[in-house]
Every structure is written in C-alpha cells, then in structure tokens.
Amino acid sequence: MPIQPVHFFLPGAGLALLLAMTACTMPSKSPIADSYGSQPQLPKPKSSLLPTVNIAPAKGWPEGKMPTPATGLKVQAFAKGLQHPRWIYVLPNGDVLVAETDAPPKPDDSKGIKGKIMKWVMQRAGSSHPSANRISLLRDNNGDGVAEQKTVFLQNLNSPFGMVLVGNMLYVANTDALMRFPYQAGATQITATGTKVLDLPAGRLNHHWTKNVIANPTGSKLYITVGSNSNVAENGLDQEEGRALIMEFDLANAQARPFATGLRNPNGMDWQPQSGKLWTVVNERDELGNDLVPDYLTSVKDGAFYGWPYSYYGQHVDTRVKPQNPARVARAIPPDYALGNHTASLGLSFYTADLMPHYRNGALIGQHGSWNRKPHSGYKVIFVPFQNGQPFGQPQDVLTGFLSEQGKAFGRPVGVTVDSAGAILVADDVGDVIWRVSPLNTAAK
C-alpha cells in the first residue's frame, strides 16, 4: 500500500525530533558515478516511512567567494542582487531575461507530516519565499561580461518560469497559464497587458509548479513542461490529470496535445543540433533510498511514455503505486542518459557557439542539488558530450564549489544558457546571482 500522509499539526519540537530521526539514515556506499551514463547501476529499492532529509542549508556567497570553473575557464558575476533567479533567456539582440520567481501559494501541498517536512526543507534550502513574480532585463552595454543595466521587464506575473520569443511575441509560462506579450527589439520594458493563450494545470496542490516553454526551430509550435502533482501519485491519479508530461501547442490552430507522457518533472528542454531532436532533463522520484532513482537526460519521442508513476528507468516497477498498471509499464521506454541520483537536474542547453569549441553539440546541465541523499549530490553545472546526436562518454564538471566544507549551500544552479558571445550563463537562486563562464584567456566581449 502507498504511504498516506497523517493529517495533524506537528509542533516544532516534534518536527525537530522527526528530522533528527531521518538524519540517522545510513549514507550511500555506492559511488555517485554509478548513477551516471547510458547504463546506470540500479540497486534494489529501499522504501521507508520517512524520506532521508539531508539538507544543504542556504547560506549565500561570502564576500570574495565564487564557484570554481573547470580548468581553462573563468567565472564572473554577470548580475548580482537578484531575487531568487530561476530561469534565463537570451534575446536576439543579446539582452538577457531572468525570471525572478518562486513557488506560488499551494496550501494543499503542505498537509500532513510529510507536507510539513517538505515545507521546512524548502525553506532551509532557500525556497518558499514570496515570489517576486517578475522578469527582469539585463544588458551588458560595454561587453565586459557584466550587466550594467537592469530594468523590470515584466511584472505582476504568477510564478513565471519559461520564456521564448517567437517573431514579435514573447511567450511566458506562468505556473497556471501560458501568456503572450508584444515585444519590440531593444525594448527594456513591456507595459502591455498580456493575453492568456493556454491554461496550465495548477491549483491548491500544484506540487511541481515550474512550467517551461520553448519553440520549435520554425516557430510554428511550442513545447511546454508540466510536472507531476506528487512524488508517485500518492495524492490520487485524479490529481495528475494533464501532468507529468511535455505538451505540444500548435500556434496556428491554438490546439494543445500531450507530446510525451510519464515524465515526473521535466524542466529544461532544447534541440540537439546534430539530430534536430527535442531533449529534456527530468527529476525522478524520491523515497527509494540514496541510490534510486537517477534523474535523467533523454530525447523526447512523439507519443512515448516514460513510466511515471508506474515504473522508473524504463520498466522497473514501483510497487508503491496503486493500482498497478502492467499494460502501461510494458509501454515504458528507458531514458537515454542518467544524471545521478537526486541531483535535481533542471537546466539544459546544447552548446552551438564557437567560443568554447570543446563543448560544441554537447549538453550543459544545471544540477540544483539534492535534499534527500547522503552524501549530497548535484550542486554543480556539468557537460555531457555528444557524438552523432547521442550522449558519448562521461559527464564533465563545468562549475563546482556551490557547497561549503560544512555542507552549506553558497548557491544552487538552476537555468543554464549561452549568451550572444558564446559564454555560459548560470542562474543561481540561492546566491541571487547569474554567473558567466568563459575561456580564461579570452576577454569578455
């Protein structure tokens, strides 16, 4: 039977005791490298009444401290003093948009013991603050790799996340709706009232609230991510209607359809330059132990089912889900590449610029970091090489040093993209910074 939350008030002392109990969980004895690559090691699941809670408390960056770039690279702060920056998008003229955003109110997602633990976890990890609900524009006027100009580009949004420009229309994925705004090249602010294009699943539960959006290369269709409303459908399958999928939206006829399903919490999406296929990164399920289940990077096939909630990593059945559905499990296809257990891989951008040719055609991935694994995993930006349109070889660290020696989080990387000069931009929602990574021997431009 699936574990059901117990609905009663848990006093502060009781919560502290409960968390102390979960802190006694044994650490993993398996190298984290085992859960990366095209053939990850999948041990037997370990279910427990309470999840492992191993938080890296949000600390922020001490003066003079920065993350550590890979050999031959340098890092600088492109913009500081932001309010929980989660996602970034580069406009054709080089301006950078950043969604300063956090979770919306979702009162039904904090009920019961587990709900209260999760709320406390998110607060300790640097989330669950009131959302700024805005998109800011950052402009580097002199090409030194630092944004001298910042303006409020759009405001009064509802937990915005993904952004994409199609023609002269900017599409913004709020938590509850896809919005459209008119855009003029070079504008530093949009004051026009947006038009709702499509309702998106939200509500009082709204467990995975982030919605991302990208366009296909011709600009005729949009692809929108919608995460699940739970870990493994413990709130009931009726709460998962229209969730755990990537949606395709045809701009010509305003029709939406599920493009791929069974994706627990997809976030980053991009088009692989060699194959032209859509790829995504997905956060997989929790509470099966330190060493399950790996988050993953996968190509997204039209009509494919990726297992959630009934199975993981292909056809590995999750016995916690009731009722079982063997027919759906038989259809589940495995993802292409594992990204480590509980790494919270969110950002995805394929590198197509010339500034750092050793990254060309491969995937840059922002790993927000674990809250329920011992030891911690993620908390870095990695690069996955590609050859002939497929992942090839082991991941490489691009930006590390987000955790202190005491296990506190200086920052947590989320969205990753590439600016007009070919440098890598990383949104850090705990450090309230956007980092810029470029070659050590190349001046900003």
Image (cartoon, rainbow, N blue to C red):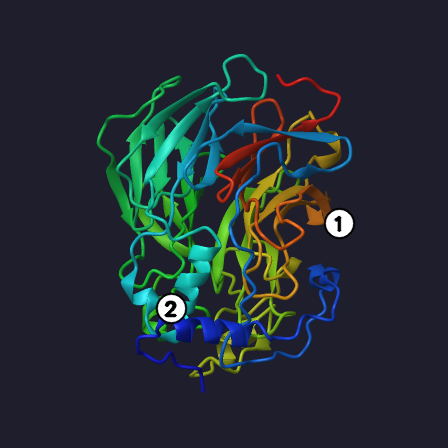
In the image, 14: left or right of 203?
right
Q: Residue type at mark 1? A: Phe
Residue projecting furthest to the left? 193
Can you say whether 353 is above or below 282 in the image? above
How crowded pointer 2 is (Cα within 10 Å; few <14, some 14-19, many 20+) is rated as some
Q: Which residue is drawn at the image coordinates 27% and 42% (left, top)?
A: 197
Q: Residue type at mark 2? A: Lys
In the rendering, at what x and y percent does residue 426 appear? 56, 37
In the image, 74: left or right of 302?
right
In the image, 289: left or right of 310?
right
Q: Nearer the viewer, residue 297 or 23?
A: 23
Location of residue 236 (image quadrant): bottom left
Q: Nearer the viewer, residue 365 or 343?
A: 343
Circle 2 is placed at which residue position?
116
Residue projecting furthest to the front? 13
Q: Which residue is drawn at the image coordinates 49% and 77% (left, top)?
A: 50
Circle nearer the viewer, 1 or 2 = 2
Camera sees residue 220: no
In the rendering, at what x and y percent does residue 233 appear? 41, 73
Q: Which of marks 1 and 2 is nearer the N terminus?
A: 2
Q: Nearer the viewer, residue 65 or 129?
A: 65
Circle 1 is placed at which residue position?
392
Tag 1's secondary structure?
loop
Can you say whether 382 is above or below 153 in the image? below
